[in-house]
Amino acid sequence: MSEKRFKIVFDGALLPGVEITTAKLNLAELFKCDVSAIERLFSGEPVALKHNLSQADAHTYLTALAKTGVDARIEAEPSIELDLSEVKPVTAPLPEADTSPYAPPRAPVGEVNTTFSELKVFSVQGRIGRLRYLAWSLAALLIMGGVAGTVGLGLLASDNMVLAAIVCVVGLLAYFYVNITISVQRLHDLGWSGWLWFLNLVPVVGGLFPIAMAVIPGNPGANRYGAPQPPNSTAVKVLAGLWLVVIAVVFVGALAGGLSAVTQEYESTMSSSYEIDEPAENVEADDAAQPALPPVDYEKE
């Protein structure tokens, strides 16, 4: 009689006090796969994680799963009755049996295709990558600045100063809100907490932190903040590339302004030097133009 075999069955149940996100991350590390591949295990349907185990190996495997926080169970494999009349010769080599109970299953745990997170511009939930962070930031700056500038100039032309100031302040606050949500989603893509946005308020660090968010690549797979973002569209790539134009314009403008300031300073210095030298020359000319006084005969007087 052959030894009785067992299998490990999991239906999505968790051990007390274990969060589902923690369990998914632990299972992904155990099976050496992405978190997105683990999602299928939590559908509520029983899934056999491991087949054809001895009782000792089944308990060892169950202990390893318990450390991840999931509540799996051992079930006996159905007995197999062989009918030698139906046995056919094997034409392909049989795969080697797993020698370790900790070996990941050969069958895929979940579907290969990766699910993407939903894009939400006005939310602090979700993730966005580097190009979408640059594109959305530029779009928010252009839209908010254009609307506030157009309405504000129109109100200024009608001598309505108070309402123009209110419109400009509202536009500025709206831009800051959108910028915060975009930055938080970019931090989530890096696997960082959104509270790190406050580093933008720290002197020196605040000038370098946005550059770091625009340069550092995000997590390729799912992390604790959700699945990765959808692929970048052509519009996103174009808007992100426009930042190069903006940087070039700012650089050229700053260079032109610096040259203009230097030129004005040089002209001002030369003009001051000319004004200082001119009175001395005029004094010498006046002295030469005055007639000589006649000599005085003191003895005659």
Image (cartoon, rainbow, N blue to C red):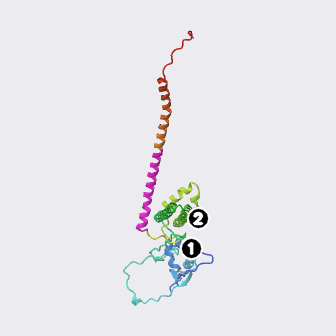
Res 33 visible: no
x and y percentages locating residue 2 in the rendered image: 50, 85
Q: Nearer the viewer, residue 130 or 283?
A: 283
Q: Nearer the viewer, residue 53 or 185?
A: 185
Total residue callouts = 2
- Characterize the magenta stretch by its predominant secondary structure: helix
Taking the view exactly as shown, the residue that stands out farthest to the right is: 17
Query: Where on the picture, by quarter, is residue 11?
Result: bottom right
- Closer to the N terminus: mark 2 or mark 1? 1
Report the Cα–Cα distance between label 2 and label 1: 20 Å
Q: Residues within 10 Å of mark 2 (few under 14, many from 20)?
A: few
Q: Is residue 259 magenta?
A: yes
Question: Which residue is at a point 48% across and 40% down the rendered structure image?
Answer: 268
Question: Which residue is at a point 48% across and 29% down the rendered structure image?
Answer: 282
Query: Where on the picture, by quarter, is residue 235?
Result: bottom left
x and y percentages locating residue 256 in the rendered image: 44, 49
Question: Which residue is at a point 50% across and 31% down the rendered structure image?
Answer: 279
The circle drawn on residue 195 is 2
Looking at the rendering, the stretch of residues picked out in magenta corresponds to 232-261
Q: Nearer the viewer, residue 135 or 161?
A: 161
**Which quadrant is the C terminus positioned in?**
top right
Q: Residues within 10 Å of mark 1 (few under 14, many from 20)?
A: some
Q: Nearer the viewer, residue 120 or 73?
A: 120
The circle drawn on residue 21 is 1
